[in-house]
Amino acid sequence: MTDATPAAPERNDFIRQIVREDLASGKHAAIQTRFPPEPNGYLHIGHAKAICLDFGIAQEFGGRCNLRFDDTNPAKEDPEYVQVIQEDVRWLGFEWNELRHASDYFEVYYLACEKLIRQGDAFVCDLSAEEVRAYRGTLTEPGRESPWRNRSVEENLGLFRRLRAGEFPDGARTLRAKIDMASGNINLRDPALYRIKHVEHQNTGDAWCIYPMYDMAHALGDAIEGITHSLCTLEFEDHRPLYDWCVDKVDLAGHPELMAPLVAKGFPNTAAKPRQIEFSRLNLNYLVMSKRKLLAMVNDGLVDGWGDPRMPTLQGIRRRGATPASLRLFAERVGISKQNSLIDYSVLEGCIREDLDAHAPRRLAVIEPLKLVLTNLPEGHEEFLEFPNHPKDESLGARTVPFARELWIEREDFAEVPPKGFKRLVPGGEVRLRGVGILRCEEVVKEGDTVVELRATLDPDTRPGGRAVDRKVKGTIHWVSAKHGVPAEIRLYDRLFTVPDPDVDSDGKTYRDFINPDSRRVVQGYVEPTAAGAEPETRFQFERSGYFITDRYDHAPAHPVFNRVVTLRDTWSA
């Protein structure tokens, strides 16, 4: 028998089964995946599942995963998003094989479309966007062919080159695939491949005034990079026939001349035919994950930016205090399937608690303080007690905690008129003071109806080494020395919405009407000195209170700021 950690059980979701079969059959000698975000916003927790799958598959099977920015819509994209997305991927614990951009391939996309035109598979269309929609038909009625569908190859090539030269205004013309206007799949009813946008691009500047549509760019980008398994969420399932059409009709692997512009820039020619596989996206209750709605909340000041700890963005979740390990555990626990489902938010919180319970050092902190004076200790009394940093992990060592005559305790640990079953401090009652001994409440000092101070006596026989150290009382409370405790700003975060499905508009209400007014509450508490002196992004369990993190941006030893990551147990369960 050894102390080695047992190997994790082999995962057997349907995607991994496909990958194993493809490797075993010799279809692929190596696995190549990619994570292809559009840099038009911050990543959210739904993307974490995709990141863990794309990079995880590559890691498990000895393959490679690229990070590719699908930057085909410069009007909505920003270099800030590019930088933050890279940071998020690395924070989750992954590193890409190559950093690519769809804009790296613009010349290849353009040459591919000239090839489609020469083959009679694409045409320049003069219909406006509204007219295209009118011609498209419905789910029960076929569409109508564009009046411009049968232009000659020569005319289409000439017009397409003029589009590139910038001769036409935005929206005047598009390049469309020539597929089937009667197809039952509306995505195949002569979809657009290129549109005119006189917008400067963050990578290519003003070199282009036409930009490829996502469906084509995504498919050909995968083919260019030699992606073996293109993993997408279920909403792309209806787009797969168009994906395959683009890959097959262009056939980059069979036409190396199309790859020449990339090879000239030093890119390897890895063109191959990828396979798209769809899986269910991550849906969590009590969240809104539409980028459009998240952006609206940011712009309208409903939250404090993309990185607000209440937001489902990875930047917000990180600042709130979740660990990368807990998000990877969550992705694993949710699993991969073809069935859409709604995951309860408590599953995520449970994964965070599980990781922090095992690894977060313990500290003493009082969130809503009430003064307690031990009257039988001399004024100026001061001693230093040793507390373990973690009750189940001796390797984390111990720290020294100052103790004095005057303490802060939690206001909720005292009840002048106790409810039934209350086991903490009451007038004339006894509790154990964590790590110190048993005290008795002798006097309650009030100002009006408000309790402002408790006076108590400490039983010396119940102190460590005393003859009655094992005497039993029903309750134990924690404390912070009033003399040594450091004032701290404590931000108590909770779920941003009050209903499980805020994304569904009903009865004239929208998600804005369900924002939880108690999703952030700021209080002034006290923490032991070792907590105050921690570096930003240090996580602790505040004993009996919950898990907290020193704020990534605002915390400093002279002004400690703690964010509540999660409570010790689920407070939302019925």
Image: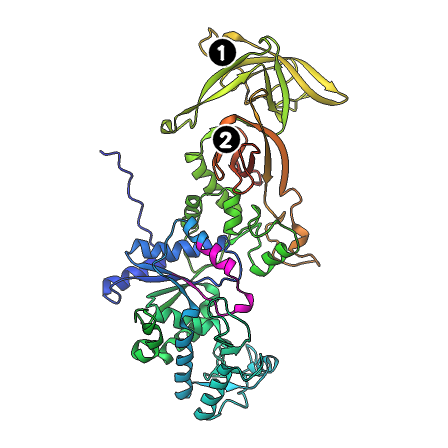
Q: Nearer the viewer, residue 564 or 263?
A: 263
Please identify the quarter of the rendering in which residue 360 is found.
Answer: top left
Dot 1, how many residues are within 10 Å of its Cα: few (below 14), some (14-19), or many (20+)? some
**Three-letter amino acid code at the position of disc 1:** Arg
Q: Residue reaching furthest right?
A: 448
Which residue is depicted at the point 75% across and 23% down? 449
Residue 80 belongs to magenta span: yes
Query: Which residue matches tag 1?
Result: 463
Which residue is depicted at the point 26% across and 37% down? 4
For the record, the magenta segment spans: 67-86
From this view, report whether residue 184 is shown above or below residue 511.
below
Residue 70 belongs to magenta span: yes
**Three-letter amino acid code at the position of disc 2:** Gly
Q: Secondary structure at mark 2?
A: loop
The quadrant of the rendering that contains the N terminus is: top left
From this view, report whether residue 556 is shown above or below residue 501.
above
Measure the C-alpha gap from mark 2 to mark 1: 29 Å
Q: Picture coordinates of residue 183 (x, y %)?
A: 48, 81
Q: Picture coordinates of residue 194 (x, y %)?
A: 49, 78
Q: Picture coordinates of residue 374 (x, y %)?
A: 60, 12
Which residue is depicted at the point 45% across and 66% down? 70
Q: Nearer the viewer, residue 384 or 188?
A: 384
Q: Say whether residue 427 is visible.
A: yes
Q: Secondary structure at mark 1?
A: loop
Query: Which residue matches tag 2?
Result: 533
Q: Is residue 310 left or right of residue 175?
A: right
Which residue is depicted at the point 24% across and 64% down? 29
